Image: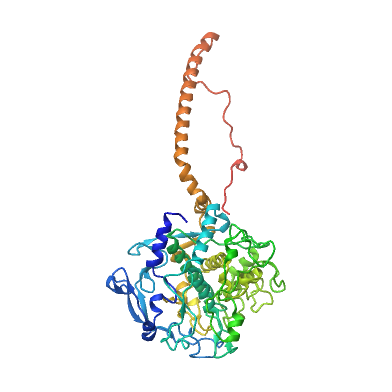
Amino acid sequence: MSLLLFPVALFLQFVCFSQQQFPRLCATTQALLSKECCPVWEGDGSRCGANSGRGFCRDVEISDLPNGVNYPFTGIDDRERWPLVFYNRTCQCAASYMGFNCGECQFGLFGDKCAELRQSIRRNVFHLSAAERRKLVSYLNLAKHTTSQDYVIATGTYQEMNNGSTPLFLNVSTYDVFVWMHYYVSRNALLGGPGNVWTDVDFGHWAPAFLPWHRVYLLHWEREIRKLTGDFDFSIPYWDWRDAQGCDVCTDDLVGAQHPQNPNLISPASVFSSWKVICSRAEDYSARGVLCDGNDEGPLLRNPGNHNRNLVPRLPTSEEVEFTVSLPNYDTGAMDRSANFSFRNTMEGFGNPQTGLGNSAVIGMHASLHIFMNGSMSSVQGSANDPIFLLHHAYVDSIYEQWLRRHEPERTHYPESNTPIGHNREYHMVPFIPLHRNIEYFISSKDLGYDYSYMLSFDQRIIDALSPYRALMMEVWPWLLGALVLGALVAITVATIAATTTRVCRGVWPWQRGEKISAFHLPDREPLIISSDSDTPNYHTV
């Protein structure tokens, strides 16, 4: 990170408000007992920025349409009818604004009035320059080692907090808040007492909200990195893993190679070798009937390719991606892991990417990458500990975007009711505050302010391919311009001398030879003529 940006980054850590649960200002006894999360926006000193028309503190509206049969309980889990267990009044922001206090802009909008529309581009990680790779790694490491000033994680249930009178929250790093969020949305339901859990529940996986939820997750993660570093041009790169024979991104200049002595660990030449994971022991939490407490649980683990090959014979192929995108139905049947010919289920990995049949004996697409990594990534709840998670899910999101653009689904294509709990169209995504409904992210990424480099036009892709050299060009451009000007002057001088010499010679030599001077002197040879279409170069996009 630039030395000039570092003071800005520190400043932003103290004054910017985050987008996730739990906002520090709402993790108090007063806020929990009043069930109200409507903090003041510093910009005008009013709650939710009401004095500036940014938003207002209002009752949370919940859809009561029925869920599927996978979760037969009511009033057991804090995530039910999110976020009513914790808050029944939150900031509801005007069209251009967002944030738990309406102090931020909607995705893709910038400026004091959130009126400036910008389109960011997520690029192939292998198209990054060496400097851009170093910046990516440094940003990740900064997020991992910077305690969040904006929000905290919950380490106990609402009941364990004595219904709000005894808050149980913990300070963690910016990166680990997102690790905790992925754990919290996918954890088992605690029914009371050791070992008494319900495993057939996940508010962000195995059902229709899988793709919209992870889209919002990446957007918020991207925004937090921008705020932390002061680099508002930052975008998450993606790993195009189609047809890969191994972990191509497992190098020390990206996410870390394997340790030379212990293949389960990260190379000591990578900063990620020192990372400690949290929320990775799902079986232990279930056995004890508790939530993740946010404490360090050992080093980041990864051993790509040393997995159960009966489950995942290989990484997904280009043909399997194309088959998956060709499926016209977003979700089908029970809209869970048994769904047949469902784009969502096949994309998630539980529908066979060659037949489209659910509950396949072979895991494919998204899930196959997690299993292939054979370490921290292979645990659903703890998978976000590995930075590969971000590169992987950025590409998953791009395939989701391919499907949206190809099929252009209506809003009604997303199921309204009878999905597994947490996945109905109007359900608020767990555990986000500000609130996001699942259906709000069943739209093109272009409407959210970002695109993928491989989906751009040919001209735009050329610009993207050259972008790693932009900084170098800015440095050498003055010298290059000077050289061009000097070269032009030399060329003009030489041409003038040559023309003068020619006129002199033509005026002398014919006279000396006794020839007549023609007013229409033609060259000895005509220029070459292209005789057929085959000689014309062909241009095409790839």
Residue 97 position within the rendered picture, expressed as x and y whole percent measured from the top left: 36, 69
Q: Quadrant of residue 228?
A: bottom left
Taking depth in this image into account, of 117 and 138 the one nearest to the observer is: 138
- Say if 464 sits above or below 65 in the image: above
Extreme residue in the right direction: 310
Quadrant where the C terminus sits is bottom right
Q: Is residue 199 visible?
A: no
Residue 310 position within the rendered picture, expressed as x and y whole percent measured from the top left: 72, 73
Residue 65 position within the rendered picture, expressed as x and y whole percent measured from the top left: 46, 86
- Say if 248 sits above or below 443 in the image: above
Residue 36 position within the rendered picture, expressed as x and y whole percent measured from the top left: 36, 82
Extreme residue in the left direction: 51
- Say if 214 sits above or below 258 in the image: below
- At x 35%, y 64%, the residue is 114
Taking depth in this image into account, of 17 and 440 the one nearest to the observer is: 17
Taking depth in this image into account, of 392 and 197 the one nearest to the observer is: 197
Q: What count of labels does the image hold? A: 0
Q: Is residue 151 visible?
A: yes
Taking depth in this image into account, of 290 and 222 the one nearest to the observer is: 290
**Residue 373 left/right relative to 171:** right
**Residue 235 left/right relative to 35:** right
Which color scheme does this rendered protein use?
Answer: rainbow
